[in-house]
Amino acid sequence: MSQPQDPDRPKSRFYGMRIALVMLAAALLFGFIQWNRARDLRQQLESARHPAEAHLTLRGEGLRGGYRLRQLRGPGFYEGDEPSWELIEESPSDTVNSIHLPAGIIELTWGEQSWPLLLPRGGKLDIDLTPAPKGFCRVPPGPYLGRLDSRLSRPLNPEGKTHGPSGYLISEREVSLADYGEFLRALAVARNQNDGEAIAPRDHALEFGPYCSEFERKHFKKGCRGHRPVGGQMDLWAKDIKDGIPDKILRFVNYFDALAYCEFLTLREQNRGRLVRYRLPTQSEWEKAARGVDGRPFPWGFSPISAARRGEGDVNLRVSSHAALRSPYGLFHMGSGVSEWTSTPEGRLRRVVAGVSFDLHRDEIYLGYGLGESPWMRSPALGFRVVREERDDAK
């Protein structure tokens, strides 16, 4: 016989679960409100500690002709920030100017050059406006929005240090066939193989010559390689030379070739009495030179363009072509041409390769991405450019 039901008893057996869910939702809402208040308080404290103001020092003979500062984005660095001010100094009275100005992304124009700068809240930036040597672009010091997530980053040298007021000098174009040909002829002379007119020998182990890098000496116990671009059984260097286009972008060079070429440039400058050192850029140096400071994924801006317009697939691409696609600091082919070796390690031996390649099927490029490759890797999609260090940096 069934028992009569209590009319005051809840009819749903899920009544207790509902109460628990309501309490959980209330706890989550309370936690969110507390977190939001704490975030607002942190932002207020940060603003009080670091107001939306920064300090910029400009120095060097480049100031003599005057300069202009224009805000491109506000302190949040976002694209939607409206520019709010402009400062023009037509004839500075000194070669050092110190300026307090609102934080944000700033455009500095002096002479015929225009540089983007990023000034965070409470930040200080000291910039030397000395013109760059011919064939090089000077990238000013300071942070930039980098990597795949546009995080606040800083370009670092191979020792992991930031750059001084002079920033760093990076070649405006990739190494060409003519550039590398000078190195191969000098290498042949140094090894007493011929009179220097013929091209260097095939790629096989030889003695340690004057252009062997420390990295190369460590990994080739019997001697440095010939550094002549080859691929399988094909003599690629001879083929490219016969094409008769000296300003073609150099390809089929591995990491050791690039290091030896830098050593060749360094010794040539030292023989001329100049305290100069050449090396490969680090990944962060390469990235800032390619992207500027505003987080753009392409040297020319935020919108992709077709592979054909970038010159992809053109094996006779010149090092100074497609000038309209240069980076914010004036570098050619940072988003076209060949991928480029950097000195940044990935693991014990691999080195990061930055930039894009000869690939008609890949229209999606992104300059914040780098790929580790074997230092012995040679490819029609691999080349390099160099960094020049002067004065006290050339040690």
Image: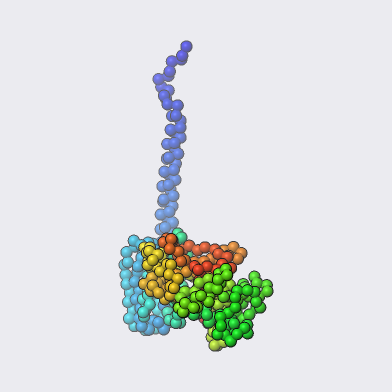
Q: Nearer the viewer, residue 171 or 41?
A: 171
Res 24 → quadrant? top left
Q: Is residue 139 above or below residue 197?
A: above
Q: Position of residue 224 (x, y in %)?
A: 63, 75
Q: Is residue 155 visible?
A: no
In the displayed orientation, state which residue is furthest to the top. Answer: 1
Q: Which residue is at 52% across, 63% downward?
A: 371
- Quadrant into which the C terminus falls: bottom right
Q: Is residue 333 above or below residue 11?
A: below
Colour scheme of the rendered structure: rainbow
- Residue 376 horizontal side relative to residue 286, left or right: right
Q: Which residue is at 52% across, 67% downward?
A: 379
Q: Is residue 260 visible?
A: yes
Res 322 → quadrant? bottom left
Q: Position of residue 77 (x, y in %)?
A: 39, 63
Q: Which residue is at 43% across, 81% downward?
A: 131
Q: Position of residue 62 (x, y in %)?
A: 40, 82
Q: Which residue is at 41% across, 43% downward?
A: 29
Q: Nearer the viewer, residue 6 or 86?
A: 86
In the displayed orientation, state which residue is furthest to the right. Answer: 222
User: How many marks are shown on the rendered structure?
Assistant: 0
Q: Position of residue 359 (x, y in %)?
A: 45, 64
Q: Nearer the viewer, residue 209 or 290?
A: 209
Q: Nearer the viewer, residue 112 or 94?
A: 112
- Residue 101 horizontal side relative to residue 256, left or right: left
